[in-house]
Image: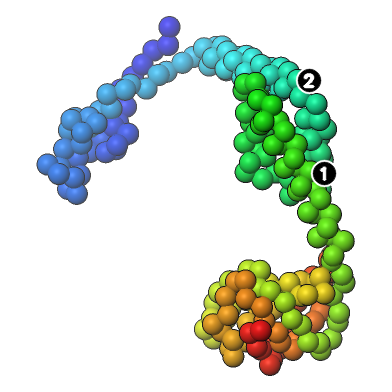
Amino acid sequence: MAKTRERRCTRCGGQGGWRGWPGWTCYRCAGTGIDPTPEIVRTPEEEAKLAKRRQQYHDRKLRKAEEQLESNLNAHEGLREAFETAYAEGNDHCLTGFATDIMSKARRFDLTEKQAEAFIEHIDKRIQTHREREEARVPAPEGRVNIEGKIATARVEYNHYGSTVKILLIDDRGFKVWVTLPSKIMDAEIGDRVMMTVTLTPTDDDPTFAIGKRPTKGEIV
């Protein structure tokens, strides 16, 4: 059987209290500085046995979860294909909060028909939406151009000269631009449509995404 030994209180560090606490005294050790839960001291052999039991318990839980998942995949038509699609490389957009919740539940208990149908429909919609967005994207132009579109995100960046507001603009033609928001339209918000003249440089790894510089003639439309 594993031995035990005293240890310092895990709340007060063995001091028995602190001046910032009401009455000074630590409620965990009652001012003794000794933790009420002693430290367990095990031999290397005992540690090895404990580690083995923990691994066996983990393996049993994993095996049970995989069996439950397989049962659900066999019970609902189309569910296996939906799972494979969601886990496929490049389909990270499918792993939404709703999808991962259903995936977790499928490993713990039987899914209802409605849950399975909702998951399949959700994955189909995510794939379709992603495909439509990809088809709509076009290479960003290069050089001095006029851009117009919706502000998707905004972020304040600080430097030695003060602060600037950076925005991600989705141009109506399908490409994206990361650019400083012109001071003339500093009150523009996410979701607003704006236009400006800017010098674009498409990125090497994604031709549909460009970095904008020297923005001028900003307007909210």
Q: How is the image coloured?
A: rainbow
Residue placed under numbered mark 1 in the picture? 89
Residue located at (26% from left, 38% from top) = 12
Q: Amino acid at mark 2?
A: Asn
Q: Decide if residue 83 is on the left or right side of residue 52.
A: right
On screen, 99 above or below 136?
above
Query: Disc 1 residue type?
Result: Glu
Q: Quadrant of the N terminus?
A: top left
Q: Residues within 10 Å of mark 1 (few under 14, many from 20)?
A: few
Question: Element under label 1?
Answer: loop
The reply to whether residue 167 is visible in this rendering is: no
Corner quadrant of residue 60? top right
- Of the two numbered discs 1 and 2 on the same chain, state the one appearing first in sequence: 2
Give the SS element for disc 2.
helix
Disc 1 to disc 2, how far (Cα)?
Answer: 23 Å
Q: Is residue 87 left or right of residue 8?
A: right
- Image point (59%, 86%), residue name: 185
Q: Position of residue 38 (x, y in %)?
A: 33, 21
Q: Which residue is mark 2?
A: 74
Please name whichever residue, 135 or 92, is drawn nearer the observer in this view of the structure: 135
Residue at 75% across / 86% down in the picture?
A: 198
Q: Quadrant location of residue 160?
A: bottom right
In this view, the residue in front, 42 or 9, is 9
Q: Is residue 34 left or right of residue 1?
A: left
Is 148 in front, or is 204?
148
Q: Nearer the viewer, mark 1 or mark 2?
A: 2
